[in-house]
Amino acid sequence: MTSATVIILALILILFAVLLGYIIWLVNRESDKKKKMQEGVREAEGALHKAFDMLKEDVSEQILMLKKAQTQRQLTEEEEKIIKQLRRDLSLAENFVMKEVEDVEKEISGDK
């Protein structure tokens, strides 16, 4: 083996090592991005839960006010519809948002 061949082989090995190092760096970088995105989704999910808890509390208070009025008088048909609509809308909104959060989590984890 000539010295030129040894140099070429050494350069090929060095190039291979650099390429391998770059690939490892890219994989780690993508892994870090994925972890940050998952953390962001968890934080957003927590904030959504808090927001829905507050919304539920407010809606429950409004329903209680209507129910309290019901002890003094019969609720109008419209007031009864409002109670049902508030409960239904809140449930639908929460289910929709939770499904979207699950879809994002699946997308991030790669379970498409």
Image: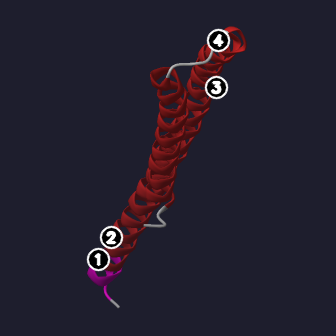
Spatial distance from mark 1 to mark 3, Cα to Cα? 67 Å
Q: How far from the left and from the top, in percent, is residue 69?
A: 65, 10
Spatial distance from mark 2 to mark 3, Cα to Cα? 63 Å
Mark 1 vs mark 3, foreground winner is: 3
**Tag 1 near tag 2, CB within 8 Å:** yes
Q: Secondary structure at mark 1?
A: helix
Spatial distance from mark 1 to mark 4, Cα to Cα? 96 Å
Mark 2 vs mark 3, foreground winner is: 3
| Segment colored magenta | 2-7
Instruction: Say above or below: 68 vs 26.
Output: above
Mark with earlier residue (4, 2): 2
Three-letter amino acid code of the residue under disc 3: Asp
Is 57 left or right of 25, judged from the image as shown? right
Residue at 47 percent of width and 35 percent of height:
89
Residue at the spot of label 1: 8
Residue 21's image quarter?
Answer: bottom left
Spatial distance from mark 1 to mark 2, Cα to Cα? 5 Å
Residue at the spot of label 3: 53
